[in-house]
Amino acid sequence: MTRIAKVDLFPVLVPYRRVFTLGNGVTSKLEDRGKPVLFVRMETDDGLVGWGEQRAEPRWSYETIETMVAAIRHHLAPLAIGLSPFEIGKFHEKAEAELSVSVSNGMPFARAAMDMAFHDLAGKLAGVPLHALLGGALSDEVALCSAIGVDTPDQMAAHALESKMYSAYKIKVSGDAVQDERRLRRIAEVTGDKPLWLDANQSYTPGNMLRLLDAVADLSAIVCVEQPVKSPDWSGMASVRMRSRLPVAIDEGSFSAMDLAKVSRFQAADMVVLKICKAGGIRKSLETASVARANGMELLGSGLTDCGVAFAAALHLFSTLRLALPAELNGPELLQDMLVKGLDIRDGVARVPAGPGLGVEPEMEKLRELSMEGI
């Protein structure tokens, strides 16, 4: 049987094409060389290669490029050596014993990159696209929403107008109810009746969030609000949900399936945002989706400004699920290069890759050009 024989790491700096600001102040700056991303190359004893990828965004979650490299190099890669690419469950069991899940999830970003490479190899060995191993795609396309970062009302409206080919918009709000109302009204002038998905990225208090929602109650295109309060504040989430006219989605406040089970007991959310990175991989994301469905919670799909490997993994996963809104996978909008071959994205819609495994391959020359020194 084919076994995993080698794991190589490629930390790179990926440049952005535009400034992007979240409600909690995380910003991509065009003068930066780029944001750190880790590519994982997994090779079997008979020469088959699978790929994983994960971005480091320590102001969103605690992992850095340095911790991901160390976790994989010294802990996770040795656990994978000798396993079959189909032994994904065994890998996760070993990983959870090696790097404790603690209260929620242990080193999920690093594990997600490894999990993607396992799935890529498994699909290639089976000769089928990844979604076939997950139960099959419900559609061969995934609609995307445009991600509009915090800026002046006019600049945000201009971005929305540039993105008019998209069928929905995810709007970042800043925690300032007065300014955010102005922003939303200006955006609504150009987006019409297309859905607006608000994302506060933990920037609001419960009272201020409710004031904003009351102020924009006449904007019928607003369909939900995501993570209004700090991630540990499930009581604050429940308070907003109980008094809000809109569905409330949880993201940073729920990483694992066990997290979501507790969130449901708190009645703290109507929807959950699925991100492969925070769940610890594709397999773990499906566990979260199952808990959501069992508790009557709708699914939203998102990423963390992924390059092409993680973007493709999300397409396969989301193609097997019913999402409440178009997926927010904003890499094609925000990054200068997705660094892979095999993606087909047109007019705000991405086709699910049809080749074996993830169906995409990194461009090695570009990875070498963007390589981070000393990691």
Image (cartoon, rainbow, N blue to C red):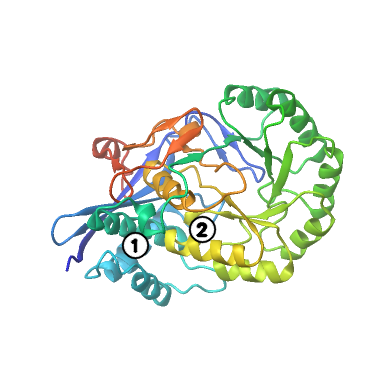
Q: Position of residue 19 (x, y in %)?
A: 55, 31
**338, above or below 92, in the image:** above
Q: Name the residue rendered at 80%, 48% in the picture.
A: 209
Expressed as whole percent of the image width and height from the top left, the position of residue 366 reads: 29, 35
**353, 21: nearer the viewer:** 353
Of labels 1 and 2, earlier in sequence is: 1
Residue 1 or 5: which is nearer the viewer?
Answer: 1
Residue identified by numbered label 2: 278
- Between marks 1 and 2, how big is the CA–CA gap? 16 Å
Residue at (77%, 49%) from the top-left corner? 246
Question: Quarter-wise, where is residue 339 in the image?
Answer: top left
- Report crowding for label 1: few under 14, some 14 to 19, many 20 or more residues within 10 A (C-alpha): many
Residues at circles 1 and 2 in contact by the CB criterion of under 8 Å: no
Q: How many marks?
A: 2
Q: Secondary structure at mark 2?
A: helix
In the picture, residue 95 is in which quadrant?
bottom left
